[in-house]
Amino acid sequence: MATMQGNLVRRFWNWVFEERQPLPRALKLALAAAMLYLAFTFMSIAVGLLLIRVPVVYFSILATSILVPLLSLFLLLIAPQRALAHRNVAILFAMLLAATGVASGGLGVTISVDMPASVRDRLFPGDSRFPLHANDMIAVGRDGDIFIGLQHYNRVQKYDRTGAFIKGWSLGGSGIFSLWLDDDEQLHVARSRARCHDVFDTSGKQLTRAKVTNLAEMSSLLAKSRAGETSTSSGVTYRLGRSGWQTQVVRVVPSDQPVTVIRDPFPLSLASPPMAVIVTLCGIILGGLWMGIGKVASLREQYRWKSP
């Protein structure tokens, strides 16, 4: 299977750069870029659906994609001929690992920018829970409900005072935004790239939207909240941060020990932007390592046959 994939990549490369093809190279490059973009978009959606709907399957894919190349390295020590004969399988799973990491990292752009709102709301409705990041925005209501603005996904997620996930809704678009609650318990979201100021009730229903064309006014709105931290009128502080693999929200009460209120489930935390980069790098390193091992083995085989 990996050999067939390598042949397809080689044919695709030759089609793009072969001079004797009737199509101009610029047109072929544009077609190639469009095909790669579509492939990336559909893979991001597929990975996102697995991540949100069946996170155990997502974790199983990651675990298998890591274990197969690593176990193949162990097999190389005890049965080198058998390991080399199946090296393409290790390369294939390493490529799958890297592709999953890239798709996880690009999910935010795909659903917030590229995907139409009607499709996004159908595939990822209000019960869809996305991973948190330490730089997300946070606001807390008088009843203890917690609202987190996910910068990477342009989305707001609501949790109750115990940290249980309630619902989420998408804002659409991309760019930096701020999030805060006013004295009437109305949730304000100001977005820099969209240049708008939205107001929601605490259930996520949009009440108003105002365009903000003045740069100073937008800067003032963006300064109303601080990434990763907020404080209530009673002096209680809520902080977003990472603890090992997982992103969490910690409540800090004066003269008391910090209490973890929200913690991302383990499979979900593996798709947060920093972890997606690590997963991608692991796939690239393992794939490159096995490609190098295969190349060295081929050169040794050629030298053995040429030697008298």
Image: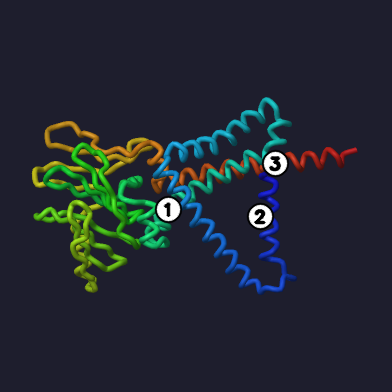
Whole-number angstrom distance, CA of label 3 to CA of label 1: 33 Å
- Nearer the observer, 152 or 252: 152
**Is 284 drawn above or below residue 17 in the view shown?**
above
Residue at horizontal 23 percent and vertical 62 percent from the top: 190
Depth order, front residue of 237/132: 132
Q: Earlier in the sequence, mark 3 or mark 1?
A: 1
Where is residue 16 shown, x and y percent of the image? 66, 65
Within-10-Å neighbours for mark 1: few <14, some 14–19, many 20+: many
* Res 198 quadrant in image: bottom left
Say the numbered circle drawn on residue 9.
Answer: 2
Disc 2 packing (10 Å; few <14; some 14–19; many ≥20): few
Distance (Cα) linking label 2 and label 3: 18 Å
Mark 1: secondary structure: helix
- Asked if the residue under mark 1 is in contact with the one under mark 3, i.e. CB atoms within 8 Å, the reply is no
Query: Label 1, on which residue?
Result: 107
Residue type at the position of mark 1: Leu
Question: Which of labels 2 and 3 is toward the front?
Answer: 2
**Vertical order, 234 against 183 (above or below):** above
Residue furthest out toward the right: 308
x, y percentage for residue 213? 24, 73
Q: Earlier in the sequence, mark 1 or mark 2?
A: 2
Q: Secondary structure at mark 2?
A: helix
- Mark 3, residue position: 294
Residue type at mark 3? Answer: Gly
x, y percentage for residue 95?
58, 46
On-image quarter of the C terminus: top right
The amino acid marked with disc number 2 is Val
Judged left or right of residue 191, residue 236 is: left
